[in-house]
Image: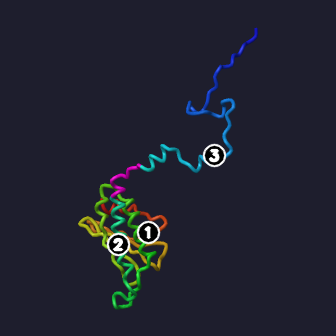
Amino acid sequence: MDIIVKKPRFEVHTNYGFGASPKHKGFEFPDDYREKRRKVAPVWLRHRRAHTQHSPAEKIIENAVATMTEQSHSLLALPEDWDGEGAVRIAEDTRAQAIGIFERALNAVAVSSLSLLLSPRITAMADGSIDVRWKSPKFTLLINISPQSPSEAKFYAVNNNRQDIRGPLKFDAPDFRFLNWLVG
C-alpha cells in the first residue's frame, strides 16, 4: 500500500500579510534596501517621536535643571580672589558637574519626594568648588563638587532623626540609593 502525501497549496510567510515577502516569486530586495532602512525611520515612528509627551515628573526635572543652570551661571562671573582672601575662580567644568549631579539626584529620588529636592542653594567656595545644599525640616543634604577631585563629589546628609551618612559620589555612576532613605 502506497502512502500519498499531498503538499499544501499555500506557503506560510513570516511577514503576517504585511507587504511582499522574499518568498513571493519575482520579488527581490533592491541592493541598497538595508542601507536605506537603517537611515530612515518609518513614518509612524517619526510621528510618534515628534509627539512624545513627557511625564509630569520629567517636565518638573527639566525645569529645575534649567533654573539651576541659570542660577549657577553667575558663579562663572566671579573673578579671581572674589572674596578678598585669595579665592579661586569657579571653572565651567565644575559647574557642569554640579548640574549633572543635581539632575541625576532628581532622577534617582521617588516622584512623591521630588518636590523636596527642586530648589537647592548653590554656593561658590574659596577653593574653586561648588556646594549644592538642600535644607528642609526632614533632612539636610550637602554635595561638594571640587575641581581637585575630577572623578567624584563628596556628600554629607542628615535626616530628621539625626542619623547621618557621608561619602563619595562617582561622576560616571553616582549611587543615590541613600536619597530615598533621606527624604522618606
What segment carries the magenta color? 51-59
Q: Residue at x 56, y 48 (%)?
A: 40
Q: Which residue is mark 2?
A: 132
Dividing the picture into quadrants, the one containing residue 110 is bottom left
Give, as a three-letter code, the residue at label 1.
Leu
Query: Residue 130 at what x, y percent from top left?
Result: 38, 77
Outermost residue to the left? 137
- Disc number lying in front (2 or 1): 2
Q: Residue at x 49, y 72 (%)?
A: 151
- Disc number lying in front (1 or 3): 3
Q: Which quadrant, please, contains the C terminus? A: bottom left
Query: Of the residues under marks 1 and 3, which one precedes in the sequence?
Result: 3
Q: Which quadrant, please, contains the N terminus? A: top right
Q: Residue at x 38, y 50 (%)?
A: 53
Q: Residue at x 73, y 12 (%)?
A: 3
Of residues 17 and 130, which is closer to you in this image? 17
Dividing the picture into quadrants, the one containing residue 99 is bottom left
Which mark is on residue 169? 1
Residue 3 higher or lower than 16, as above or below: above
Query: Of the residues under marks 3 and 2, which one precedes in the sequence?
Result: 3
Dividing the picture into quadrants, the one containing residue 100 is bottom left
Give, as a three-letter code, the residue at label 3.
Arg
* Within-10-Å neighbours for mark 3: few <14, some 14–19, many 20+: few
Q: Which residue is mark 3?
A: 34
Outermost residue to the top? 1
Give, as a three-letter code, the residue at label 2.
Val
* Within-10-Å neighbours for mark 2: few <14, some 14–19, many 20+: many
Query: Residue 120 at what x, y percent from top left?
Result: 31, 69
Of residues 64 and 165, which is closer to you in this image? 64
